Image (spheres, grey):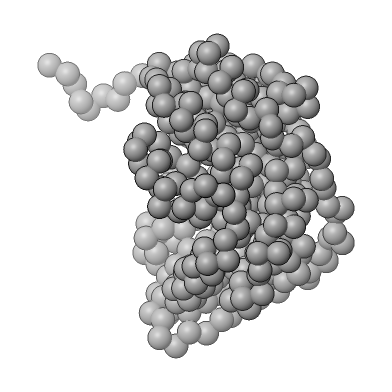
Amino acid sequence: MLDRTTPPPSKTIGRFHLSWPQAYQVKEKLPLFVLDTGSQPVIKLELICDAGSWYEPHNGVARFTAKMLRECTQDKSAQDIAHHIDQYGASVQIQVRPDTCTFTLTTLSKHLTPMLDLLAELLLAPAFAEQRLEHLKHLTTQTLKVEAKKNSHVVRKKFKELLFGETHPYGRQLTEAAIADITTRHLKQYYKNQLLSNCRILVSGRVTEQDLQTITRHLQSLPTKAQGNPLPSWPTQAPDQIHWAKKESLQTAINMGNVLVTKEHPDYLPLLVVNELLGGYFGSRLMRNIREEKGYTYGIFSQIVPLRHTSYLLIATEVIQAFAEATCQEIEKEIKALQTTPITEEELKTLQNYMLGSFLAESNDPFSVMKKFKAAYLHGLTQAHYDQYYDTIMHISAPQIMALANEYLSVSSLSQVTVG
């Protein structure tokens, strides 16, 4: 009989080898990366362009230009587009981030040709119909009104504004007034000048040579222009604390953090370890203190959010209003503990095992492996980045963690926003 009182033996996770996609070129200037490691007949294609909110001349133009591509083309209505996607059981998603705009097609391999026909039509023959724009503007405005009632949404927006400044691309937030000002003229101009700028194509799944030829044939008409915006004046926002009162709220949403370093910086990977220890997983210091010991919240987390030109620390939670001040004090207490008390060997070992185990669990299929590639490639990093990730986790020391916490996480450098 199995003795369930004795845990199975553990072992150290060895160095892992992360598959890397094969590089090709479409039209000699359009990068194409293919990761053919799938066992199922499914293909995921991502078209990534330098067309995020960083590049938009007017607030909201990047988002609306991209989203309008699914609203209608010169030959298809929104209903036609939706019917075509549903007919083949596929998915077409459009995601606009601060730095990039990504078009993602996921489809069965046998339906690749008709879905690429549609994707090419969406990208190359948009209509920007006035009626569909007004419909999209109305829906987006209603969404903003709903989000304005949720403390978690309000605090995130106010935190970014505080951290970067209201006019900076990383701090600027979409508003109802900005939506009202957007016209089809703005969208057509942005589509012409920026939307498909500096395209990169990422393909993962079970990809045959015939699939590769089909993709190349359909997407070879994409423009190869490489537009870019100069780096704006970097914000010199002083750390501050803001409370946004909402009398009807029972809970208070809390965001704390500061601006850190770029992903290419040598301290970025060690800071990931410091963050994980602070609030990155269920056994973190913040979870043990504020959730398990104090019972102030169901969950609290911290993360380092990477952007192309910087990154920032975000500590977030929601608590009953009466516990808001005490929660902020406990967060500061845990940060100071990182700065003054060395981590024990046992806790460090647990942290190392968790981080390496999580990395392997997040890299067990072609789509997630391509996600790892994308996270490095878009920041100018190579496969060696993940070798450095392993080495950093395995060799980081207690004194190094304390030094990083003192250099980058001083309580006086943290901005704080509470809503509730």
Depicted 364 relative to depicted 139: above or below: above
Q: Position of residue 241 (x, y in %)?
A: 66, 75
Decide if residue 153 is in sight here.
Answer: no
Depicted 84 relative to depicted 237: above or below: above
Furthest residue toward left: 1
Q: Which residue is drawn at the image coordinates 71% and 64% (left, top)?
A: 185
Depicted 173 relative to depicted 369: above or below: below
Furthest residue toward bottom: 247
Q: Quadrant of the N terminus?
A: top left
Q: Position of residue 143 (x, y in %)?
A: 47, 69
Depicted 191 relative to depicted 133: above or below: above
Q: Which residue is drawn at the image coordinates 52% and 33% (left, top)?
A: 117
Q: Is residue 257 left or right of residue 108?
A: right
Which of 345 and 221 lies nearest the eye of the viewer?
A: 221
Which of 344 and 30 lies nearest the eye of the viewer?
A: 30
Snapshot quadrant of residue 181: bottom right
Q: Position of residue 389 (x, y in %)?
A: 64, 29
